[in-house]
Image (tube, grey):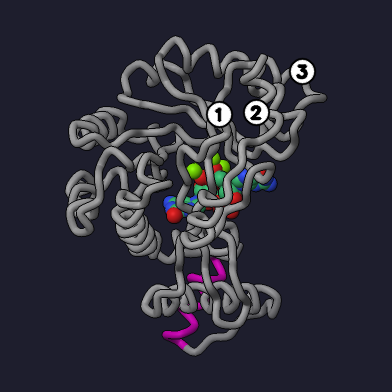
Amino acid sequence: KADLALSAAKESGKNGLHFFDPAIQDEVSARLRLENEIRLGLQNGEFIVYYQPQIDAQGNLRGAEALVRWQHPQRGLLAPGFFLPAAERAGLLQQMDRQVFDTACRQLAHWASHPQLNRMSVSVNISAVQLHQADFVQQILDGLARHDAPASMLMLELTESLLVGDLAKARSHMKEIKQHGVRFALDDFGTGYSSLSYLPQLPLDELKIDQSFVRSLPADNGNLAIIHAITALAASFGFEVVAEGVETEAQLAILAGCGCLRYQGYLFAKPMSAEALEQFAADRQPHPLLSQLILQ
Ligand code: C2E
Ligand code: MG
Ligand code: MG
Ligand code: MG
C-alpha cells in the first residue's frame, strides 16, 4: 500500500495530481522525511557505534559487538530498529555499513594497544548487500589496513538468511578474508528456517544462539532442548557458542549447564559507548554466579 502510494507520489510530482487518501499521504511523507533525515545524518556523522560486552565463563570480557546507533539531533539516541529498514529501503545501508565498519576498525586499532582490551574481539554485523558486493573482501582488508587494526581481533557476524542467495560466493569471500585471520560468527542462529547443510561448507568460528530461545528460559522446555542441540552442534563442528539476550541469573545457569560458556546480554551490560566499555573493563569484577559455576 505504501509502495503504491510512493509511486503515486512520484507520479504526482510529475503531473500535479494529489492523493485521495490523506492517511497514505501522511505515511508517505513521514517515510520520505525519515529517509532524508538518514541521508543528512550520514553526511553529518550522526551514526555512532555502541559496543555490547561479551563475557566468558571466567567472567572476563572476551569481546564486544559493535551496534549502530543514531545520535539524532532532536530525538536523541535511536536503536537500529527505528532506522535500518528505512536506510535499506532508501539504498543507504551500504553507506551506513561502511561508516560503522570504519569506526569499528579505528576502535579496534586503539584497543589493540589497550592493556585490558587487547585480547578481546570486536564483532561487526554484516548485511546481505555488503557480503555479496564484488569488492567485499577488499573493503574488509582496506578497512583494517587504513587503521592498522589487527585482523585477529575482528569477527564478522552473518545471518543465515544472508547465506541463502549465493552460498558459493559467500564461501569464497569468507575463505579469502579468513586467510588474513578474521573470524566469522553466525548470528541469530536457529531463526533462519534454512537447512543445516550449509554448516559444514562454511568456514565459521562461532554460533550465536538467538535471544528468542533464551528469553523464555527457564520455563520453556522446547527452547531448552533447542539450546542443548545448538551447543552440541557447535561442539561437534568445533565452533564457539555465544548466547544472546541473557537477562537473568536463572538463564545464565541453564546456559552454562548446557555447555554454553559465552554470554551477551543485559545481565552483564547493555550496549555502551567505546569510552564506557573501557571503564567497564577497568571496573570488571568476576560475576558471582560464574565464579560459583567454575568452582564446582
Ligand atoms: P543483533 O546483531 O542480533 O544484535 C543483538 C541485539 O540484541 C542488539 O539490539 C542488542 O542491543 C540486543 N540485546 C542484547 N542483549 C539483550 C538483552 O539482554 N535483552 C534484550 N531485550 N536485547 C538485548 P540492537 O542494537 O537494537 O540491534 C538490533 C539489530 O540490528 C541487530 O541484531 C542487527 O541485526 C542489526 N544491527 C545493529 N547494528 C548493525 C550494524 O552496524 N550493521 C548492520 N548491518 N546491522 C546492524
Ligand atoms: Mg549481531
Ligand atoms: Mg543476534
Ligand atoms: Mg538479533
- Helix, strand or loop under label 2: helix
- Helix, strand or loop under label 3: helix
Range of magenta residues: 4-15
Q: Residue at x 50, y 14 (%)?
A: 233
Residue 13 coordinates in the image, percent (x, y): 46, 85
Judging depth in this view, the residue of 203 and 182 nearest the camera is 182
Judging depth in this view, the residue of 74 and 24 nearest the camera is 74
67 over 293 or under it: above or below: below
Mark 2 is surrounded, within 10 Å at the Cα level, by few (under 14), some (14 to 19) or many (20 or more) other residues, namely: many
Q: Quadrant of the N terminus?
A: bottom right
Q: Which residue is mark 2?
A: 290
Whether residue 154 can be seen here: yes
Q: Is residue 5 left or right of residue 132?
A: right
Q: Which residue is mark 1?
A: 58
Quick check: marks 1 and 2 in contact, CB under 8 Å? yes
The alpha-carbon separation of the residues under discs 1 and 3 comes to: 27 Å
Residue 101 coordinates in the image, percent (x, y): 34, 55
Quick check: marks 1 and 3 in contact, CB under 8 Å? no
Q: Which residue is mark 3?
A: 221
Name which quarter of the figure residue 206 lies in.
top left
Q: Which mark lies nearer to you, 1 or 3? A: 1
| Disc 2 Cβ-to-ligand 1 distance below 8 Å | no
208 over 115 or under it: above or below: above
Mark 2 or mark 3: name the one nearer the start of the chain.
3
Q: Residue at x 36, y 52 (%)?
A: 114
Residue 254 coordinates in the image, percent (x, y): 71, 22
Is residue 166 in the magenta section? no
Mark 1 or mark 2: name the one nearer the start of the chain.
1
The alpha-carbon separation of the residues under discs 1 and 2 comes to: 7 Å
Mark 1 or mark 3: name the one nearer the start of the chain.
1
Is residue 7 in the magenta section? yes
